[in-house]
Each structure stands twice: as structure tokens, then as C-alpha cells.
Amino acid sequence: MSSEAEKWLAEHRIDEVEVLIPDIAGVARGKFIPASKFLRQRLRIPESTFVQGITGDYAELSSEVYDIDPDLILQPDFNTMRVVPWADEPTACVIADGYRGDGAPLEISPRHVLRKVLALYEARGWRPVVAPEVEFYLVQQNKDPDYPLEVPVGRAGRKEAAGRAYSIDAVNEFDPVIERIYDFCEIMEVDADSLSHEDGAGQLEVNFFHGSPLEAADQVFLFKRVVREAAFKHGIYATFMAKPMGGEPGSALHLHQSVVDVNSGKNVFSNDDGSDSELFHHFIGGLQRYVPEALLVFGPYVNSYRRFTRYLAAPINVQWGYDNRTVGLRVPNSDAENRRVENRIPGADVNPYLAIAASLACGYLGMVEGLKPTEAFAGNAYKMKEGLARDLFQAHDLLESCKPLHDVLGEEFVRLYCGIKKVEYEAFFQVISPWEREYLLLNV
């Protein structure tokens, strides 16, 4: 493969290569290297890269491995090599995996966590299929984080006063940015499909084609970089925060999931007569049982829990239903071949590899444990009681104590992930908010 990669680099006249590893937060870390040296030297990076949270702080873990911080060997996945369209010099990027000195994969890394879950499906003769939907906001540049975000000015010279869901005119307000996003996506071979305006002011959603879970996660990982860089080119920000603005809907990463039988190629969610299969109901049962305990993955930050608000386009429980957007687990209208479950709980702020891994893990546990779901819910699920943790601290405890998820995702990974989230929460807890100064400073 290295000879093919060398030929590709020469054909595209690449000067420099970004070797990327998605860290625990889904942030791109790695190294730049001249293209002439890329295939001729072994690339390394400290293992502690995967012990660092979004704040830059490290999880407090008692382990000889983390104490001595050995090097990881980076192995590029040449299937992910792309041209970087926003770079000033001819640049390529490639996603890499980390391996320890003995050749063992770094099982705490997000891509390996997802591969671990996919291997469980493969052992059963199943192949999951995933199609993500990614929401995000375009906002004015906010160079001082103490000030709230504002919607950017569109081509009409005015800001959106309110959300205009599915409005073509509202999308056209940001035509130059959107055209650049699609141009960048084409160059980077990111298969972004349809785009629509969502409920929030300046909020957009892009849908992706269904396919391999690992490839889908790679696509979302690259897409986030594309959108941010396209926005920078137009003097604005693009944000994937779960809840960037008060009073506006949050942003989600909806995951459409189905499972195919490897031998027959048929969707195991459907019987021969086109009806719902038993495995379909078990998959939903697994989501209902385990998603609340995996919520720390679907809501990875303090801000994530602000999104789970009644009547603001985000679920508050794990009810399921047919073509019902008030539930956490929606079954869209489809034929038997395309029967699927849409997990509407993950926020846009998730690591896509971990969110897909955790969602498939929940469904897998339901299938192998034979879990039964509740009856399909036909009403307004916002009128039902909340079924999700309301803060990161509670979600942390639920994941930390869920042995079945430890077994599927990996004990070492869950321990590391919970450790990182604990450090991030402690960092947040040291910050005094404007609300506290507003209502407590002179009144208590």
C-alpha cells in the first residue's frame, strides 16, 4: 500500500502530510511531516495523548503504563488519505491508529473501541449499517468567551430573529459558506448529502449516506474539520456544541442504525413477510435498557445536559415509536429492507467513533440478551417523565457501574473515559457562572 500512497502523493504534488489521530474527545491530534519523509520513517506519539481531556488536563490513573508515558507507533489508514482543501501549501491528511511497542492495538483509542464492538457483531454473522445526521450552528466570531453567542449576519444584512426550520430562503442567507462546505467536502471525499435549516437561528443539518460504521465515523470526524475551516474562511464560527445558545434548540448527532445478516445480505430487523423481527425488538430493548447508562458517551460535557429540554427538539427519555420525533428512539417510515432505528439522544459534541460504538453496543446487548422493549409510544413523549440523567456527574456514576458496557466497550477504556470526565467536571466546577454573580452576589 505504501507504493500506492507514494504514487498518490506524487500525483497530487503533496508537500506536507497531517497524520491525524482522533483523541477521546474526537479532537484531531497528531503530527505534520514533509511528504518526502512520510513513508520513510516510523511515526510515534506519546500514549498520554489519549489520557487528556478537552480542558488539556490529564486523567488521574494509577498505571505504570501511563506513569512512564511510552510512545505509540502510528499506522496510517491509507483509505482515509485526503487532500486538505484549506491549506496554503499542497497538503494531505490521513487518519492513523495507535499501536503499542509489542504490536498490540491501543484498545482505549476511539477507532479501536469501535472496531471491538464491530468484531462482536461479526462473530455473530451480523454487519451493522449506520447513517449519521449532524447538526451545527453558524455564529458570529466570539473572541471573548464571557459573551453569549450571536447569529451571524446573512446576505440580507440582518440576523435571523428566530429559527426557520426547512426554510430554503434561510439556507440561502448563508450560500457562500454552504457552497464552500460542499466544495471542501467534494475535495475531501466526504459524502455529505442533503442540507436543511433546522429549528434554531443559524442552525443547519447535513445528512450522510448509510454505510460502514467505521467509515461513517471517519466521515463525521472529517466533516467537523471541513465545516469549521469553511466558516473561518468567511469570518464566522461553526460550532458543534450541544447547546450553544440559551432558548434555542440544541444540536444532535442522530444515528440511523440497522443490522444486516452477512450470509444472506438481508436486514435482520425484518421478517420475510416484511414485519418487525424479534431481533429488531431486542435491539430497541437494548437501547432502552443501556442508553441511559451509556449517556456519558452521548452527552460528554456539562453543556451536553442543557440540550435535554422538553419541547426543544431533543429527547428527554428512551421511549420508542414509529415516525415520532418526540421519542428518543425513532423508527422512521420505510420498507422492510430499510427498517432502522434512529437514536436521537447523542449530541453533536460527541466523539463520533465512541457514540456509534456505544449505540451499537447497547443494541448488541439487547440482541444477545433477548431484551424486550416497551410498547411503541404513539403520543407526545415530552409529556412522559424524564428518563435520562440530568447532569454529567450522575451519568458518570451510571456508566462507571454498568458491567455489561464495560465488557463490550472494554474495561480499560471505560475506566479511562470516566477518569477524564471526572477531571473535566472538576475543572468546570471551579468556574463561577454569570448566573451566580447575577442572583447571588448582592442578594444572599
Image (cartoon, grey):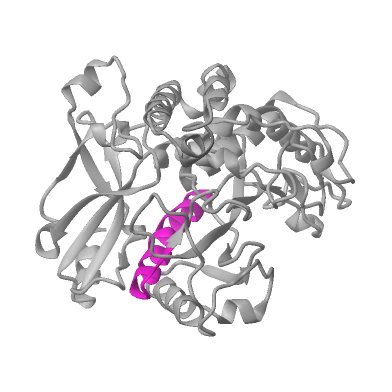
Q: Nearer the viewer, residue 2 or 78?
A: 78
Residue 362 occupies quadrant: top right
Q: Nearer the viewer, residue 213 or 324?
A: 324
Instruction: Pick the quarter of the image with the N terminus.
Output: bottom left
Coordinates of residue 383 in the picture (x, y in percent): 84, 40
Coordinates of residue 37 in the picture (x, y in percent): 10, 58
Visible residue check, residue 346: yes
Q: Residue at the spot x=46%, y=32% of the render?
A: 441
Q: Is residue 299 above or below residue 151?
A: above
362 vs 244, left or right, is: right
220 vs 164, left or right, is: left
Q: What is the number of callouts on the image?
A: 0
Q: Which residues are magenta?
A: 213-237
Magenta part mainly helix, strand or loop? Answer: helix
Q: Residue at the spot x=49%, y=29% of the render?
A: 409
Q: Is residue 60 above or below residue 105?
A: above
Q: Residue at the spot x=53%, y=49% of the render?
A: 213
Residue 5 occupies quadrant: bottom left
Coordinates of residue 384 in the picture (x, y in percent): 83, 36
Residue furthest out toward the bottom = 156
**Can residue 413 be found in the magenta stretch?**
no
Q: Residue at the spot x=29%, y=29% of the render?
A: 58
103 vs 225, left or right, is: left
Q: Is residue 173 above or below residue 108?
A: below
**Can residue 235 be found in the magenta stretch?**
yes
Q: Nearer the viewer, residue 314 or 343?
A: 314
